[in-house]
Structures are given as structure tokens and as C-alpha cells.
């Protein structure tokens, strides 16, 4: 939680000048992620996902959204290019869902270790207000998922339900927000465990859970994860998405299971959860390189409305 560890080796003067600003930005962000996002959007920066306006002041009549969804994209500090892509992909979809849902996209990592990343990530925090640093060592399969869900009420809630649904998503997953919103508008608001149940190759088995490509919990379950800390303690490692389901099962929670397969799937190929592109898609996973992103966005006519912006040779 306290990011002010000063680097030991001597640093250039420019870095010394930037450091306090960066540290302040990071600290503000850790402590007040909502407020920071709000300030960023008030300052005219396009804070991804804040098109609804966080404050509700302003005079313009804004109908209350049908539901509010937090999408936490778990990623690593150094993945700047991927975040840039995801910001565009989600910001461009906001107008299509703004009338019914408030969708906030946040990029989530554990403690930013490298001094370079700390400065550069702070720039993003200042420009977009959409990154969240959790108080955990950066890891995979060692409790990041638990750190994320259990931090959400404290970071965003302020004692009340800030969102109806809280999603954990991969940074190689593309969600189509209008299709997701349509599907969620029909989903239960409580005790909800929603996503793509794996394994994909049989209908109902014993060792199943929602795939880490992206799944969501209703707010009451997120609060339950905080309240059940003592029971969950020591059970936060391992394959995290399966582990999370084991807490729900043991606690008798998540009984409203919504498995939207095959609307969520892996990029077409040989993987068990792969599927050909289909028009009713909610999400495509395993977009591990730009070629896959381009093919996927092209299939869904994502940029079809764009007029040519270069002379055809
Ligand atoms: C993309 O546009 C083409 C041409 O208009 C159309 O035939 C196709 O159904 C669209 N694809 C999707 C996924 O909407």
C-alpha cells in the first residue's frame, strides 16, 4: 500500500524531479482510485469507462443505469501496448452501452516493482485514471485474484455497493460490451457466478469452474469474499479461478450460475475451448498478438464504419 520506497542508486536529476509527482500520483491512485478517475475525466482526459460521468453533478439529466459493471483487467505493469489497445477497444464501445449500463474498465496489477514502470505507469494514472495497484507481490497463481476481489469494496465501495457486477478479465480477452450488457440485463443480480464454464468439452463434470478468460460475481459475492477472509485464508494460491470456485462451493455461494458458452470462447484453433467466430459472441480469448486482435476485430466489423484515411495507392 505504501509505494514510497526510494531507489538506492543515484538517479539523474530529471528522474528526481519526476519522482515526487509520480509517487504522489501513484499514492492518490492507490488510495482514491474513483476520485482520481473522476479528476482525470473532469480535466478532460478520456478516462476509459467514465463516459457516464462519475459525479452526477453537471445539470444534464442522466437516467440511472440499469446496472453498473466493473471490469478489472488483471495485467502486468510493462504491458503498455496491450493496455493502449484495450483502452481504445473499450472506450469505442462505451456509446453503445451508455444508455443502459455503466461499465468501468480498470487495469489491475500488484505492486509495481521496477522504478521505470513506476514512473511510466504513473503517467497513465495521471492521463487516464484507470490503473489500480494492489498491495500484493506481483504473481500468477499466488493470490492475485483474491487480492483483487477482496480489495474492490474498500477501493470502490466506500461502504455501499459501487457496482452490481464485478468482473475479473484477462488482458488477452476481447469483450463485446453491447452483447455482454444484453446478457447481463437478464442475469440475476445476487449470488451470481457468470462466465464460461470449463472444461468446455463436456456438459457437466465435477472439476468445473468459470474460465479465467473473464468471469464475474455479483456485488454480494464480492462482499462475501471479504467477510469470509478467515475461511479463505491459506486457500488463495494454486490455479486461481478454480480456487475461487472452491470457496464459493464450500460457502454454498454462487448458486446462480450462468454459463454463456458458446458465446465466450478461445480464438479459433485447436484448444478445447476454441470456437469459430459467431455473430452472437460475448467474448473471445487468447488474443495473444496483434494478428489475432486484428482478425477478431475485423470479423466483428469493429472498424467497418471508418472511412479510408490514407490515399489508396
Ligand atoms: C459484418 O458486415 C458484413 C457486411 O455488412 C455482414 O454481412 C456481417 O454479418 C457482419 N458481421 C457481424 C459479425 O456482424
Image: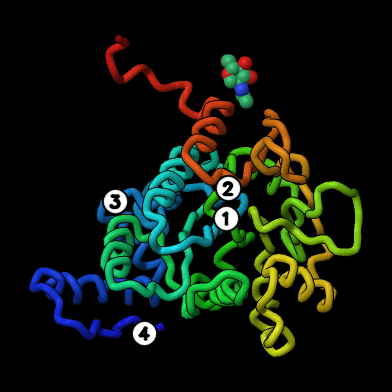
The residue nearer to you, when weighing 191 against 206, is 206
Q: Which mark is residue 170?
A: 1
Tell me which numbered mark, 3 or 2, is placed earlier along the sequence: 3
**In the image: residue 15, left or right of residue 36:** left
The numbered mark at residue 293 is none
The residue to which callout 2 is attached is: 173
**Mark positioned earlier in the residue sequence (2 or 4):** 4
Q: In this rendering, is residue 304 above or below 239? A: above
Element class at badge 3: loop
Say which label, 3 or 4, has the lower sequence index: 4
Q: In what element is the residue under mark 1?
A: strand
Q: Is residue 164 left or right of residue 205?
A: left
Q: What residue is shown with label 4?
A: 2
Q: Is residue 119 above or below residue 6?
A: above
- The residues tagged by marks 1 and 3 sit, at their Cα atoms, a distance apart of 25 Å
Question: SS class of the residue under badge 4?
Answer: loop
Residue ID for mark 3:
45
Amino acid at each position: 500500500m505504501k509505494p514510497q520506497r526510494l531507489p538506492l542508486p543515484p538517479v539523474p536529476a530529471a528522474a528526481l524531479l519526476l519522482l515526487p509527482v509520480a509517487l504522489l500520483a501513484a499514492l492518490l491512485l492507490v488510495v482514491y482510485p474513483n476520485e482520481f478517475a473522476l479528476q482525470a475525466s473532469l480535466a478532460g482526459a478520456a478516462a476509459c469507462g467514465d463516459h457516464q460521468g462519475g459525479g452526477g453533478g453537471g445539470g444534464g439529466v442522466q437516467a440511472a443505469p440499469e446496472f453498473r459493471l466493473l471490469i478489472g483487467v488483471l495485467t502486468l505493469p510493462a504491458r503498455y501496448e496491450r493496455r493502449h489497445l484495450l483502452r481504445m477497444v473499450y472506450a469505442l464501445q462505451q456509446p453503445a452501452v451508455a444508455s443502459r449500463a455503466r461499465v468501468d474498465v480498470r487495469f489491475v496489477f500488484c505492486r509495481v516493482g521496477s522504478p521505470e514502470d513506476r514512473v511510466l505507469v504513473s503517467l497513465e494514472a495521471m492521463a487516464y485514471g484507470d490503473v489500480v495497484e494492489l498491495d500484493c507481490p506481483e504473481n500468477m497463481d499466488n493470490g492475485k485474484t483474491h487480492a483483487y476481489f477482496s480489495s474492490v469494496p474498500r477501493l470502490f465501495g466506500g461502504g455501499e455497493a459501487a457496482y452490481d457486477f464485478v468482473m475479473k478479465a484477462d488482458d488477452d480477452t476481447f469483450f463485446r460490451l453491447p452483447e455482454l450488457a444484453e446478457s447481463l440485463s437478464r442475469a440475476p443480480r445476487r449470488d451470481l457466478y457468470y462466465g464460461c464454464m470449463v472444461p468446455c468439452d463436456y456438459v457437466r463434470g465435477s472439476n468445473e469452474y468459470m474460465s479465467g478468460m473473464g468471469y464475474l460475481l455479483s456485488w454480494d459475492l464480492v462482499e462475501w469474499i471479504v467477510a469470509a477472509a478467515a475461511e479463505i485464508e491459506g486457500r488463495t494460491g494454486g490455479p486461481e479461478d478454480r480456487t475461487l470456485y472452491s470457496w464459493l462451493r464450500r460457502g454454498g455461494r454462487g448458486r446462480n450460475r450462468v454459463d454463456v458458452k458458446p458465446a465466450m470462447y478461445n480464438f479459433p484453433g485447436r484448444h478445447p475451448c476454441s470456437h469459430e467466430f459467431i455473430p452472437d459472441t460475448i467474448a473471445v480469448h487468447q488474443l495473444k498478438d496483434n494478428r489475432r486482435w486484428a482478425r477478431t476485430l475485423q470479423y466483428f466489423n469493429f472498424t467497418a464504419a471508418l472511412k479510408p484515411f490514407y490515399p489508396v495507392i
